[in-house]
Image (tube, rainbow, N blue to C red):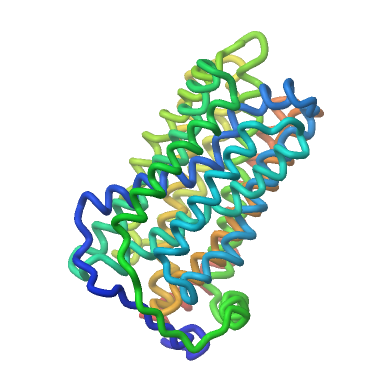
Amino acid sequence: MGHPSGAGGVSVGAVGAQPLSRAVAGLFAVACGLAVANVYYAQPLLDAMALELGLRPATVGVVVTVTQAGYALGLLLLVPLGDLVERRRLVTGQMFLSVGALAVVGFAPSSAVLLVGMAAVGLLAVVTQVLVAFAATLAAPSERGRVVGMVTSGVVIGILMARTVAGVLADLAGWRSVYVFSSAATLVVALALGRVLPHERLRTRLSYAALLRSVLSLFVEEPVLRVRAVLALLMFASFATLWTPLALLLGAPPFSLSHSQIGLFGLAGLAGALAASRAGRLADRGLGNRTTTAALLILLVSWGAVLLTPRSLWALGLGIVALDLAVQALHVTNQSELYAVRPEARSRLVAGYMVFYSIGSGAGSLGATWVYAHAGWAGVCAQGAGLALVALVFWGLTRVSVARARSAVG
């Protein structure tokens, strides 16, 4: 099944490139983890940011929302540039700009400057998607799956470790140190990538405007993209519903946990995410729909454990493991199903899909802080479980059309 509009006449080749070594693939993974972590550092720091910069608890979630909005905009406007601009220049350029954006956040004198800096951090963090596609292009065909898996693992670890790193650094030197440290680390990685990334020879018949239009046309042409994008929006809204107000709950009495202690709950999520690594292999065996159903059920049930947090932190830990297992398994399955639809348009499919991911994360964060301020932890859990239930019902209503589209591709 092929569509001329998806192919786009794009041809990309590395000039004199050698097969991607394990060391360089590892550097790609580090760069991806560092870039995506910038989007999530703020979640355990919201209380400290609100206190210092005068943000109200009910609206402090806007810090996460503007970051996710910037990320969504970057997915739509920057990721397609990989077909027009040499990716070596695109990657290093974005990372050097990220150094400046992170420094702006770290030294922000007011909430307005902070929000502008966070929006820029989110916008530039989409370098992660460019790096994954670049790694897939550079890898030898026989090594492509291993390389992409290795680089993608950097993304997952970056997301989950961001809260722990942010908590530890904030306790040691204040929340601003998190962004100053990340700015310095990003500079080091950008310089290293500039030394090892190969040059490319690009040949394309598409203009930048045509590339952007092709992302939108894919939503019209592909039912799998429409369904998986809506699932991404709902599941990541549910995911953000937990993590955004969690620092506000655990940092206040009776828990009064430090930023480091709050950040450690990210390690519980890592266990769930690693357990979800088999989801892609299940999708390869034609079990993607069953995996999706199971993940959505686990996501819904996980909120029952999270609801018990005021009485038991062990219940919170169990809920986090289950929630992260469900979200990461569903995320892997979604992408696996998308890759099977249009091999010639993978980067644009994922860019469109990830826009919905960011919208969900931003909306979930903003809604969760408002709900927590007005309805407490029970209200937060109702929001998270409600989103999971809507996703499950939506999937039940659309899975037949997805199965038909998938069989047509096969």
- Is residue 4 shown left or right of residue 376? left
Residue 386 appears in the rendering: no
| 388 vs 282: above or below | above
- Is residue 141 shown left or right of residue 293? left
In percent of width and height, residue 300 lies at 56, 42
Q: Name, please, the residue furthest toward the top.
A: 254
In percent of width and height, residue 386 lies at 67, 44
How many numbered marks are there?
A: 0
Front residue of this view, candidates 389 and 8:
8
Residue at x 48%, y 91% (from the top left corner): 4
| 236 vs 315: above or below | below
In percent of width and height, residue 13 lies at 32, 77
Q: Quadrant of the C terminus?
A: bottom left
Q: Quadrant of the N terminus?
A: bottom left
Within the image, what quadrant is residue 54 found in?
A: top right
| 20 vs 65: above or below | below
Within the image, what quadrant is residue 62 found in?
A: top right
Residue 160 appears in the rendering: yes
Residue at x 53%, y 38% (from the top left corner): 301
Front residue of this view, candidates 289 and 201:
201
- Is residue 149 shown left or right of residue 133? left
In percent of width and height, residue 173 lies at 54, 18
| 97 vs 403: above or below | above
- Is residue 74 shown left or right of residue 1? right
Residue at x 21%, y 70% (from the top left corner): 141
Within the image, what quadrant is residue 336 found in?
A: bottom left
Front residue of this view, candidates 96 and 219:
96
Residue at x 32%, y 65% (from the top left corner): 136
